[in-house]
Amino acid sequence: MDDDSKPIESSPAALLRARLKTPRAAAIAGILFSVLLISSLWLLRISIPADPLETGAWIKTSSRRVSFALDLVPFAGICFLWFIGVLRDRLGLLEDRFFATVFLGSGLLFLGMTFVAAAATGGLILAYSAQPEALFGAATFVFARAFTFDIMHFYAFKMAAVFMITASTLAVRTRITARWIALLGYASAAVLLLGSGYSDWVLFVFPSWVLLVSGYILIDNLRGPSRTTLKDDER
């Protein structure tokens, strides 16, 4: 069969254009994830005291603001899934199974535990609206508050640090982002691993790094085909 009989849709140029559509959309989703999560964390930080054993006075004065912050979390999670998708798409045939498994697993664990923490906090607000007087001083409130603090600071964002380490390792090996961004990812992951349990502000490191990566990918896609994509097509 002659090459001229080949469908136009299967030409390398057409396939390249089709593949570039998803990374661009997902890069924007990564930026949205960062903005939504930073906004949510900031609202929670200024509304809820850092001490996990506080008495819960914030529910009386800041419940609406906290509820709004929690409403942002599911949308941030959806955008984060798109962000994972764009990184895997840029890896293409260069994706390493070992690192890709840890990368995907840590990202999903971070997302799942963040949802659990948000649901637990939302449950406290619903319980207060049902029985305002019974909630304060109850062992259930103390447990739920401590549970939410621990799962966010010691588990969810530790998984975020693992996600950053594996993503940075893949970036160094495949050059899907600039090398300095990958090195900054290692440093940021170390800050999260060591400091997430001591300060709420440390949690902002992760969405800030995702914002940087997403911005780089978006600009790279607007400039033209990436080196990784061209290598995949050659193979």
Image: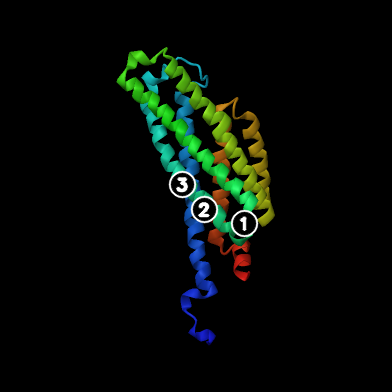
Q: Check disc 2 and report the residue beneath it.
A: 85
Q: Quadrant of residue 197?
A: top right
Q: Which residue extends farthest bottom?
A: 2
- Residue 38 in view, yes or no: no
At x 56% / y 44%, what residue is drawn?
Answer: 105
At x 48% / y 32%, what residue is drawn?
Answer: 41
At x 54% / y 84%, what residue is drawn?
Answer: 3
Side of 28 relative to 160 (left or right): left
At x 55% / y 43%, what residue is drawn?
Answer: 107
The percent position of residue 18, horizontal first and vertical second, equals: 48, 66
* Amino acid at pointer 1: Glu
Nearest the viewer among 111 and 26 is 111
The percent position of residue 48, horizontal first and vertical second, equals: 46, 23
Disc with the residue nearer the chain's start (3 vs 2)? 3
Q: Nearer the viewer, mark 2 or mark 1?
A: 1
* Amino acid at pointer 3: Cys
Circle 3 packing at 10 Å, graded few (<14), some (14-19), many (20+), is many
Q: Which mark is residue 234?
A: none
Tell me the distance, in whole angstroms, between the alpha carbons under discs 3 and 2: 10 Å
Tell me the distance, in whole angstroms, between the alpha carbons under discs 2 and 1: 12 Å
Disc with the residue nearer the chain's start (2 vs 1)? 2
The percent position of residue 66, horizontal first and vertical second, equals: 40, 28
Side of 77 relative to 179 (left or right): left
Tell me the distance, in whole angstroms, between the alpha carbons under discs 1 and 3: 22 Å
Q: Check disc 3 and report the residue beneath it.
A: 79
Nearest the viewer among 179 and 111 is 111
Circle 1 packing at 10 Å, graded few (<14), some (14-19), many (20+), is some
Disc with the residue nearer the chain's start (1 vs 3)? 3
Q: Which mark is residue 95?
A: 1
